């Protein structure tokens, strides 16, 4: 089996709170795991291995009964909200085997996001998902994308988000220009919630903004603060602050807080979502009757489509393994944050491996009842 090219011991975004409704089963694949999820009548989101413990039938293709039990559509085994099998039609009188239970996956719901832990459950308490308060704060307008399936490894998405030197030529004429590639880059590192983070900082003065930013934030020539931070392997936070020249941080700033979640499905597929946030009372210049956050949400998908195009082509080249022996990536000084992100994620994977101990017996086992 191919080794995972992503950390498993990590909190990943499973979706937004409103997507998990009471009485509705949903099936997912996160970090190589097939998972079934639902919200209980008590309001708690739960997640389990999607395979019935009897014959591997996908429970996401089954149903929730009126009494809250999950009934497998194949043989009728019923599971409660703790994943324990409490009924087997073929064993009406016999004791239910102790092993008749589903593997649970830890869940944390905060700031309108649902986070899932896909790795070693004993390590889950060592880490905390990053906060995203703007998404849930009524003082902010917030709009999120639908789930975007990207045929590329999640690390390529992270590198794309940390590196805005690609704004020219990839995004030239919308959010990018040639001058953006020449902005000096500062690097910041730290630790929060058990994760090491890396942040790029790009400050500009007397900067002529690309067309989309003028449309969204009014000012044409600005002083600007632009940061991109990989908070965890699951989430990148982008913050943009702009104001007329000499007026930055004097109370007339405009800009946004933009979150990107990147959840690995497997080694070559990822789920990407973006969540744009601006002060609720900020209106756009392109359409003064439309809040800035909605105007961005209308126009931003065209930018993401350009990134998705590039990421898919990168992954296709990575898949041509015969050429890898003769190829070595060239790293530029502007790629320092990208290299650091790779190192952080690589270290996480090495720690996981060192804690796994001896390999488990992967052979199928049958349990008699």
Image (tube, grey):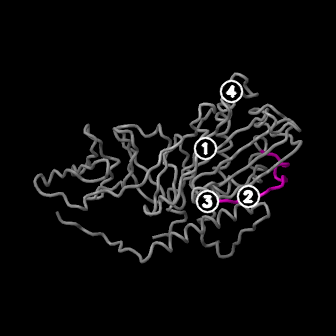
Q: Position of residue 153 (x, y in %)?
A: 58, 59
Compared across the picture, whether 259 is left or right of 357 comes to right
Element on which disc 2 rests: strand
Q: Is residue 179 within the magenta segment?
A: yes
Q: Which one is earlier in the sequence, the residue at label 4 or at label 2?
A: 2
Q: How many marks?
A: 4
Element on which disc 4 rests: loop
Q: Which one is earlier in the sequence, the residue at label 2 or at label 3?
A: 3
Taking 221 as reference, is 334 above or below it?
below
Element on which disc 3 rests: helix
Residue range (magenta)? 176-190
Q: What residue is disc 2 on?
A: 188
> In whole angstroms, how far apart are the C-alphas of marks 4 and 1?
21 Å
Q: What residue is disc 1 on?
A: 274
Q: What residue is disc 3 on?
A: 155
Cβ–Cβ under 8 Å for marks 4 and 1: no
Q: Residue at x 43, y 63 (%)?
A: 122
Element on which disc 1 rests: strand
């Amino acid at each position: 089996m191919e080794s995972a090219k992503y950390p498993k011991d990590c909190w990943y975004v499973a979706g937004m709170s409103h997507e998990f409704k009471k009485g509705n089963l949903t099936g997912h694949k996160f970090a190589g795991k097939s998972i079934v999820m639902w919200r209980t009548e008590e309001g708690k989101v739960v997640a389990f291995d999607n395979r019935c413990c009897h014959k591997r039938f996908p429970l996401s293709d089954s149903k929730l009964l009126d009494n809250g039990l999950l009934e497998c559509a194949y043989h009728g085994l019923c599971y409660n909200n703790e994943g324990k099998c409490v009924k087997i039609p073929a064993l009406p009188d016999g004791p239910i085997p102790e092993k008749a239970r589903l593997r649970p996956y830890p869940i944390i719901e905060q700031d309108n996001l649902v986070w899932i832990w896909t790795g070693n459950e004993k390590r889950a308490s060592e880490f905390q998902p990053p906060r995203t308060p703007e998404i849930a704060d009524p003082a902010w307008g917030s709009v999120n994308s639908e789930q975007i399936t990207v045929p590329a490894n999640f690390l390529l998405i992270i590198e794309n988000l940390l590196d805005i030197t690609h704004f020219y030529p990839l995004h030239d004429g919308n959010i990018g220009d040639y001058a953006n590639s020449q902005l000096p880059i500062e690097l910041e590192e730290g630790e929060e919630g058990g994760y090491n983070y890396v942040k790029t900082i790009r400050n500009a003065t007397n900067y002529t903004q690309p067309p989309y930013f003028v449309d969204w934030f009014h000012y044409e020539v600005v002083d600007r603060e632009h940061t991109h931070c990989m908070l965890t392997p699951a989430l990148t936070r982008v913050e943009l602050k702009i104001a007329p020249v000499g007026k930055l941080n004097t109370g007339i700033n405009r800009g946004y807080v933009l979150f990107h979640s990147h959840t690995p499905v497997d080694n070559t597929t990822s789920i990407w979502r973006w969540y744009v946030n601006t002060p609720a009372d900020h209106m756009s210049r392109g359409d003064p009757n439309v809040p800035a956050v909605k105007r961005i949400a209308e126009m931003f998908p065209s930018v993401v489509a350009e990134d998705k195009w590039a990421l898919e082509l990168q992954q296709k080249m990575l898949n041509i393994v015969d050429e890898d022996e003769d190829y070595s990536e060239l790293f530029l000084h502007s790629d320092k944050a990208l290299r650091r992100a790779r190192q952080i994620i690589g270290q996480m994977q090495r720690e996981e491996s060192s804690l796994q101990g001896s390999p488990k017996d992967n052979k199928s086992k049958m349990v008699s009842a």
